[in-house]
Amino acid sequence: MGPVDEGNILRAGVLSGHAWLRHGFGTRACGLTRPPAGYAHSRVLMLHQIHSGLVWPDPAPGQPGDGILTRTAGRLLAIRTADCCPILIADVRRRAVAAVHAGWRGALARIAEKAVGEMHRQYGSEPADLRAALGPSIRACCYEVGDELRQHFRARFDYAAALFQPAAEDPVQSRYPMLFLTGSPPGHPGDPRWNPVPRLRFDLAQALARQLAAAGMSTAAVEILPFCTACRSDLFYSHRRGDQGRMLSAIGVLA
Ligand SMILES: [Zn+2]
C-alpha cells in the first residue's frame, strides 16, 4: 500500500476486493465536508459523536452515538476523527457494514466489541465473516497519559498491562541519574517535580484490536493502518497537536 492513493484516501487491504463494498480513510487533504470521491450519489449518514459506547443500526442523522451499522445499499456511514481511531468493519458474507469512532472513552466502554455484537444481533454476522480496519489515529509513540487511565483499564480488561508502556525517559533524568537516586535533588526536598506521576504511553489501536479479538475475530482479519496522526502532520489532523480540522472516514454498500 502506498501512503495515500489518488484522491488522498487511504484504503485497507482487508476491505478491498469486494465489488459491492466501498471504503476509505480520508486525509487532511480531503477536508471535513467532502465525502470521498465516488460517493456522490450515496446518502451520507453521520452521528453526533459523544465518545460513548453507543452503537446504532440505521440511526437518524445526527443521533448521539459513536458506532453505526447498516445493510442498506447506497447509505454511506461516515466518522470524523483527529487522533481518535476510525474503525471500519464489513461482513463480507451478509454485506453489512459498520463505522466506529473510538478514543480512550469509547475503548473503555468496549465500543469495538459492541459493534461486532450488534452486527451479530442485527444481521446474524459471524466473527469469521468480518473484516475490520483501524484507520490513522494517535499511536503509542505520541499518546502520553497518566496512571489514572491505566487504573480505569485495569479495572475492566485483564490484558490492560499490555496497552501501556513507560514513556520515554526524561532527558534531564537520563543525563543526571545521580540526582534522582534519592527521589529529590540536593536542595529540593519534597519538590513534586522530582517525584512525578508515572508517565505512560497508551496504545489505543492495540486496545481496540484486542476488543475485536475478544469478539471472536482473527488477527488476520484486522488491519491496523500504520499511521500516527500526531507524527504525520503532513497527512493528518491531530487534536493533541492543536488542529481544528477532522478527517472523514467512510464505508458503505454500493447501491
Ligand atoms: Zn506518533
Image (cartoon, rainbow, N blue to C red):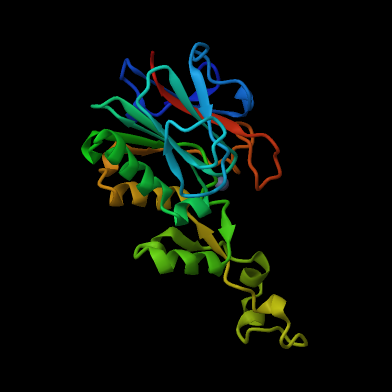
Can residue 110 be seen from the camera position used here? yes
At horizontal 63% and vertical 66% (from top left) the residue drawn is: 170
Q: How many numbered badges does the structure rendering display?
A: 0
Q: Position of residue 28 (x, y in %)?
A: 62, 29
User: Is 235 positioned to the left or the right of 172 in the image?
Assistant: left
Query: Would you identify the image quadrant in which residue 30 lies?
Result: top right
Foreground: 162 or 42? 42
Q: Position of residue 144 (x, y in %)?
A: 58, 58
At horizontal 62% and vertical 76% (from top left) the residue drawn is: 177
Foreground: 47 or 60? 60
Query: Would you identify the image quadrant in which residue 115 lies?
Result: top left
User: Is 242 positioned to the left or the right of 68 in the image?
Assistant: right
At horizontal 27% and vertical 43% (from top left) the residue drawn is: 217
Q: Residue furthest right?
A: 187
Q: Position of residue 100 (x, y in %)?
A: 45, 39
Q: Is residue 92 above or below residue 162?
A: above
Q: Position of residue 157 (x, y in %)?
A: 37, 63
Foreground: 170 or 6? 6
Q: Can you say which quadrant of the picture contains the C terminus?
A: top left
